[in-house]
């Protein structure tokens, strides 16, 4: 079972915007983040597209002066 990193951004009006960096065009709705990812992957399969994974991805947070 593949794992995906998710990013949550708190919105001023409440709630969160959730993005999945490995699935950049994942724009779908579901009751949970897991369901949204599963629906997106189902759509990729139906269209014969490759299912991205996070294999080999490294993560680092870099702070810069602004």
Image (cartoon, rainbow, N blue to C red):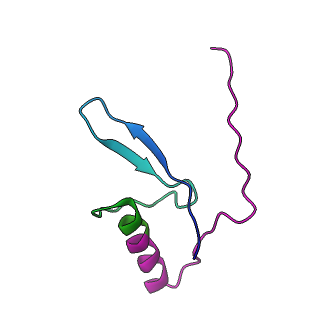
Magenta run includes residue 54: yes
Q: Look at the picture and state if 40 lies above or below 16.
A: below
Q: Which residue, as the protein is rendered here, is positioned at the far left?
A: 13
Magenta run includes residue 48: yes
Q: Residue 11, how many percent across, how many down?
A: 32, 34
Q: Which residue, as the protein is rendered here, is positioned at the far top?
A: 66
> Residue at 37% of width from left, 65% of height from top?
36
Q: Is residue 11 left or right of residue 23?
A: left
Q: Give the range drawn in magenta.
A: 38-66
> Residue at 48% of width from left, 77% of height from top?
44
> Which SS does the magenta portion mostly show?
loop
Q: Residue 21, how many percent across, how many down?
A: 56, 53
Quarter of the rendering occupied by the C terminus: top right
Q: Look at the picture and state if 49 lies above or below 14.
A: below
Q: Residue 37, how many percent across, how many down?
A: 43, 67
Quarter of the rendering occupied by the N terminus: bottom right
């Amino acid at each position: 079972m593949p794992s995906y990193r998710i990013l949550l951004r708190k919105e001023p009006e409440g709630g969160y915007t959730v993005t999945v960096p490995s699935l950049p065009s994942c724009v779908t709705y579901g009751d949970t983040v897991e369901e949204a990812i599963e629906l997106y992957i189902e759509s990729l399969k139906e269209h014969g597209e490759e299912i991205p994974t996070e294999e080999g991805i490294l993560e680092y947070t870099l702070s810069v002066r602004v």
